Image (cartoon, rainbow, N blue to C red):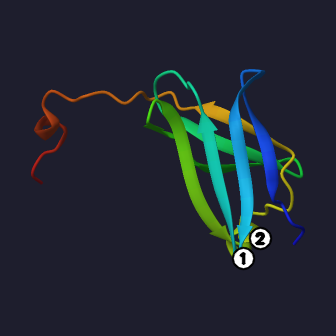
């Protein structure tokens, strides 16, 4: 597997939205993404590898920015068919997080 370490610009609807840094740490690759402002809702980081879209994980708000930190082994990346990183982008999920006034109403005894 080629070394995928490096810095990659994260795009969001055609504009630069943040930075993904990938570093090799022994048998693992650490993915660190930082985006200053992702708006509202759930935002997933996806990478494009040899024409294939691969979801990496959800960004979460932290210290006024949106962040993601994940570690993957080389075997896990092979299983995900990540051979290179061509581009990075944000994918917005249609469902928005919101506070549920009565969470107990979502469940029922069967």
Q: Is residue 15 above or below residue 104?
A: above
Residue 31 is left or right of residue 93, and the answer is: right
* Picture coordinates of residue 16, whole percent (x, y): 75, 25
Report the front residue among 23 and 83.
23
Residue 7 is left or right of residue 93, and the answer is: right
Residues at circles 2 and 1 in contact by the CB criterion of under 8 Å: yes
Report the front residue among 100 and 108.
100
Residue 75's disc number = 1
User: What residue do we see at 54% from left, 42% from top?
Assistant: 67
Tell me the quadrant of the picture where the C terminus can be found: bottom left
User: What residue do we see at 79% from left, 61% from top?
Assistant: 82
User: What residue do we see at 90% from left, 68% from top?
Assistant: 2
Residue 98 is left or right of residue 69, and the answer is: left
Q: Which residue is mark 2?
A: 78
* Picture coordinates of residue 61, whole percent (x, y): 45, 36
Tell me the quadrant of the picture where the N terminus can be found: bottom right
Q: Is residue 23 above or below residue 89?
A: below
Residue 22's disc number = none
Report the front residue among 92 and 21.
21
User: What residue do we see at 78% from left, 21% from top?
Assistant: 14
Describe the element under mark 2 as helix, strand or loop.
Answer: helix
Within 10 Å of disc 1 (Cα), the crowding (few <14, some 14-19, many 20+) is: few
**In which quarter of the view is residue 104 placed?**
top left
Describe the element under mark 1 as helix, strand or loop.
Answer: helix
**In which quarter of the view is residue 74 placed?**
bottom right
Q: Name the residue furthest front.
A: 63
């Amino acid at each position: 597997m080629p070394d995928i370490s490096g810095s990659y610009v994260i795009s969001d609807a055609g504009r630069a939205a943040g930075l993904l840094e990938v570093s090799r740490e022994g048998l693992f690759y650490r993915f660190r993404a930082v985006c200053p402002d992702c708006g509202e809702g759930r935002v997933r980081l996806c990478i494009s590898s040899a024409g294939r879209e691969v979801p990496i994980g959800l960004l979460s708000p932290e210290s006024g920015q949106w962040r993601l930190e994940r570690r993957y082994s080389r075997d896990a990346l092979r299983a995900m068919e990540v051979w290179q990183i061509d581009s990075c982008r944000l994918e917005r999920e249609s469902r928005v997080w919101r506070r549920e006034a009565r969470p107990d109403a979502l469940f029922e005894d069967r």
